[in-house]
Image (cartoon, helix red, strand yellow):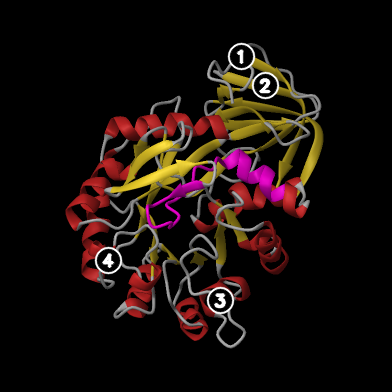
């Protein structure tokens, strides 16, 4: 099975090539050239449109009424299929603070999950909590927050078959720094989040191997001119990539612009941090045993705390461009390339020969037209019976 896209602008993090043909075959990019002749297969006219690498969401809990913590195989299939409608072709299924039993059920379920050919790919597991700060809990249930425990993490990694790729933790907690060092040394991304660390503690964590900051500005010690805190650390430390939920609920437009000016596109990773209400009607939903009220103002607990988002990745891309007027190349960095680099993925995040045929086609207004996974068109806005 093959797919030939004609006359499209191919956009990568390092530049673009206009009026190109792209041939995808057997799940890979077989050739990119100005003119390609092949027989058979599907064909698309890409005139006036742009081909970008498929979006990678490193931090997502749920979608389409399902959540990674449900520990349901059917739920993960539903999630993985729904994400194609927003251009996400691969993601980290993200857990949250709960009892060890519940977390372990979720880990075991994600570890054995095998997506169908018409679904987004699960790249691994992102463990968010329970090794976080009670002072910055947000929607992480206080009753289950515990101190970092390397033995517990090691047990979870064994349970997952080494599929835990990222962990969010608070390095200032007891045993936190040793956990950062050991976990980072094992090849897992250590992301500082739900943390009350000082700027100096952020520096120490970065030196020990932390390379990311979880949902910048949210549930982290804020910036103060005498204590730059976690926010200051994420913004100023070159080795730290900043996760950003650009829904204009978690971040003011001015805060988005400031992060872009300070970190640059090289230092930003767009995420959704979405919960099960994404793509669903407004109403009440569950998150870790807590009732979440979902309205136009976002997803909130009864106490007013934000509880994830209902953001879609294609909207995050448009929002980022709206505020910063960044280039398409920069959007590729923030929506796929940087995530692929962090995760050390050797065949994703770029549109080059031999790489996975995961891509999105967008129009001049950055509206998603098609999502391609493994060389197959799995979402087409013109054919989507549910609309957008």
Secondary element under disc 4, as helix, strand or loop, is loop
Frontmost of labels 4 and 2 is 4
The tag on residue 145 is 4
Residue 9 vertical placement versus 7 (above, below) = below
In percent of width and height, residue 189 lies at: 44, 62
Q: Residues within 10 Å of mark 4 (few under 14, many from 20)?
A: some
Secondary element under disc 1, as helix, strand or loop, is loop
Q: Residue at x 65, y 52 (%)?
A: 333
**Quadrant in which the N terminus is drawn:** top right
In percent of width and height, residue 196 lies at: 43, 76
Label 3 vs 2, first from the N-terminus: 2
Residue 212 vertical placement versus 65 (above, below) = below
Label 1 vs 3, first from the N-terminus: 1
Residue 13 makes an appearance in the image: no
Secondary element under disc 2, as helix, strand or loop, is strand
Label 4 vs 2, first from the N-terminus: 2
Q: Residue at x 47, y 70 (%)?
A: 220
Frontmost of labels 1 and 3 is 3
The tag on residue 233 is 3
């Amino acid at each position: 099975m093959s797919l030939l896209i004609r006359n499209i602008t191919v956009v990568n993090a390092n530049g673009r090539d206009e009026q190109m043909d792209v041939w995808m075959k057997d799940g890979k990019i077989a050739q990119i050239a100005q003119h390609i002749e092949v027989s058979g297969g599907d064909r698309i006219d890409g005139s006036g449109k742009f081909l970008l690498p498929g979006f990678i969401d490193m931090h997502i809990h749920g979608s389409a009424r399902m959540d990674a913590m449900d520990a349901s195989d059917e739920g993960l299939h539903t999630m993985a299929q729904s994400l194609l409608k927003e251009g996400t072709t691969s993601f980290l299924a993200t857990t949250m603070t709960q009892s060890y039993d519940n977390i372990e059920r979720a880990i075991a379920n994600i570890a054995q999950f095998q997506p169908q050919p018409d679904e987004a790919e699960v790249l691994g597991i992102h463990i968010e909590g329970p090794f976080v700060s009670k002072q910055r809990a947000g929607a992480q249930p206080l009753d289950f927050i515990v101190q970092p425990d390397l033995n517990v993490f090691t047990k979870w990694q064994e349970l997952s078959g080494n599929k835990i790729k990222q962990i969010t933790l608070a390095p200032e907690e007891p045993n936190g720094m040793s956990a950062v060092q050991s976990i980072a040394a094992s090849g897992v991304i250590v992301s500082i989040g739900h943390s009350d660390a000082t700027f100096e503690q952020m520096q120490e964590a970065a030196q020990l191997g932390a390379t990311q900051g979880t949902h910048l500005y949210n549930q982290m010690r804020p910036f103060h001119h005498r204590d730059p805190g976690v926010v200051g650390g994420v913004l100023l430390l070159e080795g730290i990539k900043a996760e950003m939920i650009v829904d204009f609920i978690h971040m003011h437009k001015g805060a988005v612009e400031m992060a872009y000016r300070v970190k640059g596109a090289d230092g930003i990773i767009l995420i959704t941090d979405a919960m099960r209400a994404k793509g669903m009607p407004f109403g009440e939903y569950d998150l870790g045993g807590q009732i979440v009220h979902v309205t136009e103002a976002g997803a909130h607990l009864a106490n007013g705390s934000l509880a994830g988002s209902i953001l879609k990745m294609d909207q995050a891309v448009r929002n980022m461009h709206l505020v910063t007027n960044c280039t398409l190349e920069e959007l590729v960095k923030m929506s796929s390339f940087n995530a692929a680099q962090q995760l050390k993925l050797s065949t994703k995040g770029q549109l080059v020969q031999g790489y996975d045929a995961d891509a999105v086609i967008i129009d001049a207004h950055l509206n998603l037209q098609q999502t391609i996974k493994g060389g197959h068109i799995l979402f087409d806005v013109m054919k989507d019976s549910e609309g957008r």
